[in-house]
Structure formats: structure tokens, C-alpha cells
Image: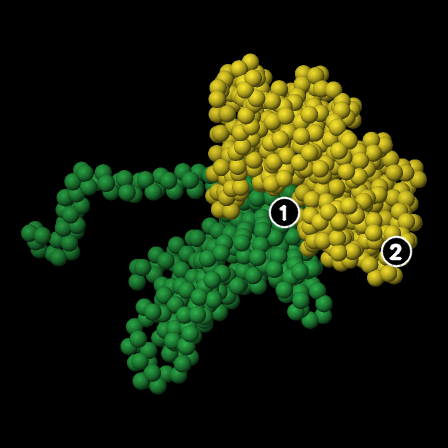
Chain colours: A green, B yellow
Amino acid sequence: MEATAASPSRSDLKARRRRSSTLTGRDRMWLWLMVGIPAFLHIALVWVPAGLTVALSFSEWDNLAPLSDISATGFRNYWIIFTIFESDLFGALFNNFVLIIWLTVCSAVGMLFAYLLDKNVRGSSIYQSIYYFPVVLSLAVVGFIWKSTMFSRDRGLLNEIWPGGPVDFVGDGSKLFSFDIPFLDPALGLSKNFAALLVAMAWRHIGYIMVMYLAGLKAVDPSLREAAQIDGCNEWQSFRRVVFPSLRPINVIVVVITVIEALRAYDIIAALNEPRGTDVMGTLVTKSLLGEGGGRVGFGSAYGVVLLLLCLGFIIWYVTNHYRESDI
Amino acid sequence: MTKPTESSPKRRGAGLNRRDFMIGGTAALGGAALLASCGDDDDAAPAATTTTAAPTTTADTGPGSTTLGSNYSGEKNREALAAAVAATGVETMINTIDHNTYQENFNTYIQQPDDVVSWFAGYRMRAFASKGVLGDVSDVWSGLNGMSDGFRSASSGLDGKQYFVPFYFYPWAVHYRKSLFADNGYSIPTTWDEFKALCDTMQADGITPLSAANDGRWPQMGMFDMLNLRVNGYDYHVSLMGGNESWESAEVKNIFSTWSEILPYYQPAANGRTWEDGAGALREKETGMYLIGTFLTSQYTEQEVLDDIDFFLFPEVNPEHGQDAIEAPIDGFMMAASPDNETAAKALLGGMGSAPAIDAYIAVDPSVVAANSNADTSGYNALQQRSAEAVGSAKYIAQFLDRDTDPDFAANVAGVGIADFLGSPDSIDTILADIEAKKQTYDFE
């Protein structure tokens, strides 16, 4: 820039201003298009429907009558799901909560697998393929496979080898453990069939996370580890102090994936025909909105809003965290 | 194809708005919901289109062509339906959608349907008729011969007009293998005590008396219905389904206490078993009896097994009601509120309600019984004859829990309660209180 002024800070400002003003009209148009089109699509396809869902949750509509027949009901839908359908709602919320914890554990296992495979174990590519294989299947397909070949009480492989006779992995909604919560009618707890589902989900999630960490580990500068070794770090210390911190970008992505997977869980449960005890927020929403009954739009929307608030909480945390990081 | 479009564009436009609105709404909150709601349309995953050409002689003078939305997605059913449509002589494009997908998305589909759509009789039809999305087919009915009054009332909306043309039905009854009964000297029970005594004998012989499935939470609705019909009678059943009775009443508790008496004879862990696995157990003679619809036989391919299957009516529990009621869901067809070609649609409906169409259907798929009494019964197999007799002699015909009441209530409240009862029969009082509380949030028709 040829314009140099007395104070460097002012010159900086000036340069910046000049740079932006040097954008031609054509550049500016492209800029607007490139920002505008995605923003428009995002608002139109995500936030407008989300807003409508919130609006619908305060109304009653059967999804058939003309739009003018939608009647406002205030907080009635919320009152109903929090007081009368509370065993469904809190059961589902609890299951989503369990999923967050469980998938986090699976993510840790995936990281461990990746770390071990990265050590160039003999036949590591074979292990890699085996662990990664389930990831190419959609969770719905995973559900079908496990239901018929593993869980089935009459024909399932797991039941053939299970000590103490066959177990109803699909239908047994009784609780493995439960605890009472004051002011809440049903005891919350982990049902047996949901625990079985967790195993099927782990089968896929571990491989998924493993691949992400494998990619991350390949990018870690080997000289860092060498340096750590020379400085006398043992395996754990070098992982904890050197490798893990350098995987930070991957960790952020994995946390996001894990939480999103846990909150949006739906397909594997739907594939199992949503047995009692396995409901999550996703299945509650669709049960009222779709399905043959399908006539309780306001009701399903209220479930949806609860899920939306959960997701928003996480998104806000993530966005603030992410921006703080990039400031540093 | 000519498409007269007098009044349809407006309606279709309105439907589109609502639908897009809904799809968007669900998409924001769950990608999976979007997937499911996309499945409703013509582009649903396992969809297929078959055109049945009319005989050329009628093509010029006939009513033109129409479209038929079909949930006859099994290979055999699809073939049979095409034969039936061909028999009507109306040029029809058949849009086949996977059976479950069709049902799950019917609410959305019916807003932009084909001219003629396949569906079920009873409350399930009435709910849509009262919302104004179906066309009045009373004039088709005036041209139908061989339909009983029972079928007419099952096809009528609350306004007394007909919105449905019955095609066939299939009864629910207790199925068994004749050879198993003959080899062990079992006789058919007609009363509750005989039934329980037979179960005891079977258990002593090392046979699980009753196949029990409830995956999907509908198979045991059949047991609930039968017990209610036997214990409390048809009128009470209709009243309960209509939302007019308390689920905490002595009558309903009585259903479940009667039910508890036979739970020890059930295959264990019914909630996780598919009805197909229950059918497998009956075939292998691991179980002795199975309360299910006659569609059971579609699970069996070996002729030897098929010939060995018979059924008996659910035994009498309360002498006041005897065995006077049977559950026999009716499948048939309805017309869209504003079809593209109403003349052809009504011609198709009239044809489907007549004997030649159902004869052509049954020639391919003999697991059902014709609704039209003029149909040719000479080719019926033994089971079909028994089905026709059983329904013909019944004083009352119920549809099915999810066809006789609000389908959302049936699926999300009653069905859930029944599954919970099977999981822990002791907590029935809590379960019924929960059902009753939830029932209060529904508006029955």
C-alpha cells in the first residue's frame, strides 16, 4: 500500500478501509451471492420450519383440515406432555441422556483403537477394515441386522450363547436399574432392551470415531513423540501430554458428532419397531406427527420443541466455545 | 392420458402447501422424520407402477383412465390386484407403495392421492370421511349387488353416506394344526374352562399352548378385542372404542384379569416376538394354538402345512355373549375427494365391488374371503369356506382395535398399555389409570 501515515495503527485502519473499498461492484455482488444464497437456504429450510414448529406446538391441528382450522391452544400441549405423557417424555429424555454418556464412552474406545492401530500392529489394515465395516451401514440397517440375527429370542445368535437361557433383547422393557425422582411419577432407568440397543450402536459408533482419530493421528508430527520419548515420557504421559493435545481439532469434531448422534437417535430404534422402553425424543416426535394416527401435529411439535431446545443449548455452547478458541 | 382438471388444481395446491409446511416442520427437528415423510409420495422407495390396459373395445366408449393407489405390495398381492383391476375393464394405472409405508404416511398421502385409494373400513375410514378428504360413493353403492347391510354400515360415514367399497375380509380366530390335535387327542374347546383345560394338557405334553407375538404392538390388540367381545360384548366394545367408557371400569379390569389367566400359557416374552416368528413356532408344533388373522397362512409355503391348518372361534367366556362376535377386518377402496376422472374412478370402484374382480383376485391370492356374496365360492379352499361361514354366522363383526378407534390413540396409548401389561401384568391398575388419563386428551369422533 502506498499510503503510509504517521501512526501505524491509523495506517492500518486506512489500508483496511481502502482494501474494502477497492472491491468492485462485481466482487461485491459475488460476495453477496455467496453469503446470501446459503444464508437464505439455511433460513428458509431450517429456521422458518423450526419457527413454524414452535408456532404449531401452541396449537391443535390434525394435519388434514385446512390451515384456517388450526386453533390456538396456548400451553395445553406442553401441559399434556409434561403431566400426562410424562412417562413417555422423561423416559425418552433419559434415554437420550444415556446415549450421550454411552456414545462418549464409545468415542473414547474408538480413540484407543485408533491409537493402537496407529502403532503399525501386524495386520492393522485388517483390523481397521473390520472395525470400520459397520460404519458403511446406516443405523437403520444396523437395527435390522441386530434384530434378526443377534437379538431375536427364537433365532438370534446372542441367545444361542447367552448363559442362563434366552433373553428377550428386543421386547423386554423392564429396567436394569432405576431410581425415583421426586415429583416424577415413573421411576427413570435403563431398560434392558435399550441396553441391548446400546451395544448395537457401539458396534457402529466405535468404528466411526476410530477412523476420525486415525486420520488425526497420521497428522501428528512424529518428531513430537520422539522428543517426548527422548525426554523420558512413558507411553501414557506421551499420549496424555503430547498426542492428545495435538488432536484437539479432531476432539472438537468428535464431541459434536457424539452429541448430535445421541440427540438425533431415531433410525435404529424405528428399525426395531420402537419397542417399549427404547423411546427417544426422535421417535416421540415422529409418532405424533407421522404414523397412521398422525393427527396430533401440535402435540408432536411440542415434543419437537423440547428436542430443539436441547439442541440449541448444545449449539450455543459449541459456537461460543469455538469462537473463543479461534480468538486465541 | 386425458386429465380433466375442473376443480382439482385448487385443492391440490392447498394440499401441497400444507404438506410442504409439514415436511419442513419435521425436517428442522429430525432428519429422520424428513426421510419418513418423503416416503409418502409416488416416489416412495419400494414403489412400482403397473398399467392395466383395458380391452380395446371399451377404450373408445369407456369412462377413460384412472389411477389407483395400492398398498398391495407383496408380490402375490400385487399380481392378484392387477388381475382384479383387469377384470373391471377400466383402464387404470396402479401405484403400488410398500404396505407399511403406505399406512404410516396415509395422512399426508390422502391430501394428494390417486383417484382411487386402497384402505380399511370402519373408524379408520370414517375419520377421513368426516375430514372431507374422501369422495361420496353412495351412487356406486346403489349399483352394487351382493353386499350385505353389515358391509354397508362398515362403509358408511357418520353422515350416512358411503365412502368405501369393500373388497375382501379376513377373520381373526384361533389357528391350530389339525395333525397335532389328532395325534394328541385334543378336542376343540368352546368355553373358557375347556380352553384353559386344553392349555393345561398341552403344557403337560410339553407343548407351549399359545403362540404369542407383539412386535410392532398390534398382534396382541387382537387378543384384547376378542376378550372384550367375549367378556363384555360387542356393544360395550364399540362404546369403549368410541371413548365413551372409562378404562378404569370394572369391565375393562375384568378383561385383563381374564387375560391374566392365560398368560402362563403364552410363549414367553411376547413383546419382542414378530408375528412371523409366532407362525414359525406353530408350524414346528412347538406351540399348539395361535390367535391371529387368517393371513397367517401367507407365512407357509409347504402345501402339507397349509392343508394342516385350521381354526376355531375364540371360546365363550361370558354365556351372555356366547361366541356371537367375530373380528374380521375389511379391506377395500375409497375415492379421493376430487379425483381427476370421477367417472372412471367410480366405474373402477363399482367394478372392484362386484364379483368378477374379487374372483380374479382370489384366483391368485386365496388367503382372503370375498366381501361380495355373489362371488364364486366354488374354488374356495377349506379355510376360506370356514372363514366365510364364521363371518356369515356371526351376529357382530368388529374390525380391529386400530380400525375401531382413533388410530393415534390405538397406537400410542392403548397399544402401549397392552405391551406394558404383557411386560408386567401386576401393574395393570397403574397402566389402566395411565390409559384413562391419556384418553382424556383425545377427541373421539
Q: Residue at x 34, y 56 (%)?
A: A323
Which secondary structure lies at badge 1? helix
Q: Nearer the viewer, residue B113 or B167?
A: B167
At 63% from the left and 64% from the top, the residue drawn is A157
Residue B222 picture location, percent across and down: 76, 43
- Do labels 1 and 2 touch, CB within 8 Å? no
Q: Which three-letter amino acid code belongs to the residue tagged 1?
A: Phe
The subunit carrying tag 2 is B
Give the number of the disc on residue B184.
2
Is the residue marked by circle 1 packed among few (<14), some (14-19), or many (20+) residues within 10 Å?
some
Q: Is residue B321 above or below residue A270?
A: above
Tell me the quarter of the picture where residue A190 sits: bottom right
Mark 2: amino acid: Asn
Label 1 and label 2 in one chain: no
Q: Chain of mark 1?
A: A
**Residue A292 vertical position relative to residue A107 in the rendered view, above or below:** above
* Residue B352, percent from left and from top: 66, 25
The furthest residue to the top: B61
Q: Residue at x 54, y 32 (%)?
A: B50
Query: Where residue B397 sits in the image (x, y, percent)?
Result: 80, 33
How far apart in space, not on screen, are marks 1 and 2 (Cα)? 55 Å
Reading the image, the residue beneath label 1 is A82
Q: Nearer the viewer, mark 1 or mark 2?
A: 2
